Image (cartoon, rainbow, N blue to C red):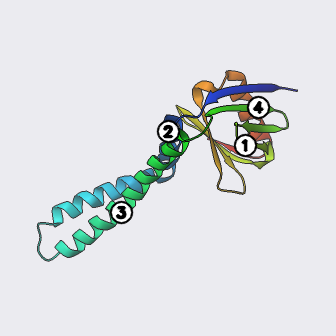
């Protein structure tokens, strides 16, 4: 039976890295398209006939970007307000367990839908619920990385 234990502090920078990684993975093309649309609307503000429509679209894009920025800030604030930021992650053949001072959660490998491997953080997504857990890449040992990848693929999950 293979077993690994990881310990790290869940800081606001880890939370923000996870949000940015997930956001760019899911919405990168939308961000680029909205940036182009934003620039075009700024140019069209000079034209009297199209000014109201351009201003309206600029407002919509700004509100959308503001909501994304607030999610980034919210994740950092939430992590910084944790009573005890020390997290312990236990990996074994049966599943993965996350333990903090206030709570504990256990996932079998079959419950893990996707593991997204980013440069600074790995995001573990639950299969049937929109729940994500972030683990900093520097906290993962080579054995832990191998175990996660092997067990998630064996259980039918995706590793990206």
**Residue occupied by mark 2:** 17
Q: Earlier in the sequence, mark 1 or mark 2?
A: 2
The structure residue drawn at horizontal position 54% and vertical position 34%, both measured from the top left corner, is 11
Placement of 128 over or under 160, stated as above or below: below
Reading the image, the residue beneath label 4 is 90
Q: Nearer the viewer, residue 136 or 118?
A: 136
Q: Residue furthest bottom?
A: 49
Q: CA distance from mark 3 to mark 4?
A: 40 Å
Give the residue drawn at x 64%, y 56%.
130
Vertical side of 47 occupied by 117: above or below: above
- Secondary structure under tag 3 reads helix
Residue for point 77% across, 38% down? 96
* Viewer-nearest of discs 1 and 4: 1
Q: Position of residue 8 (x, y in %)?
A: 63, 28
C-alpha separation, residue under disc 1 versus residue under disc 2: 22 Å
Cα distance between the residues tagged 3 and 1: 35 Å
Q: Are marks 3 and 1 in contact (CB under 8 Å)?
A: no
* Tag 3 and tag 2, C-beta contact below 8 Å: no
Q: Which quadrant: the N terminus?
A: top right
Name the residue tied to disc 1: 103
Q: Tell me the residue that label 3 is attached to.
A: 63
Cα separation, mark 3 vs mark 2, equals 22 Å
């Amino acid at each position: 039976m293979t077993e690994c234990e990881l310990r790290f502090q869940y800081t606001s920078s880890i939370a923000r890295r996870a949000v940015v990684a997930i956001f760019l993975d899911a919405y990168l093309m939308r961000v680029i398209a909205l940036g182009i649309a934003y620039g075009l609307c700024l140019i069209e503000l000079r034209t009297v006939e199209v000014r109201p429509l351009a201003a309206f679209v600029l407002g919509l894009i700004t509100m959308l970007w503001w909501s994304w920025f607030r999610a980034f800030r919210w994740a950092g604030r939430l992590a910084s307000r944790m009573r005890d930021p020390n997290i312990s992650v236990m990996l074994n053949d049966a599943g993965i367990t996350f333990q903090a001072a206030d709570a504990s959660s256990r996932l079998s490998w079959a419950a893990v839908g996707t593991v997204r491997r980013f440069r600074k953080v790995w995001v573990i997504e639950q299969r049937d619920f929109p729940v994500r857990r972030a683990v900093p890449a520097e906290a993962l040992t080579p054995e832990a990385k191998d175990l996660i990848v092997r067990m998630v693929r064996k259980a039918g999950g995706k590793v990206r």
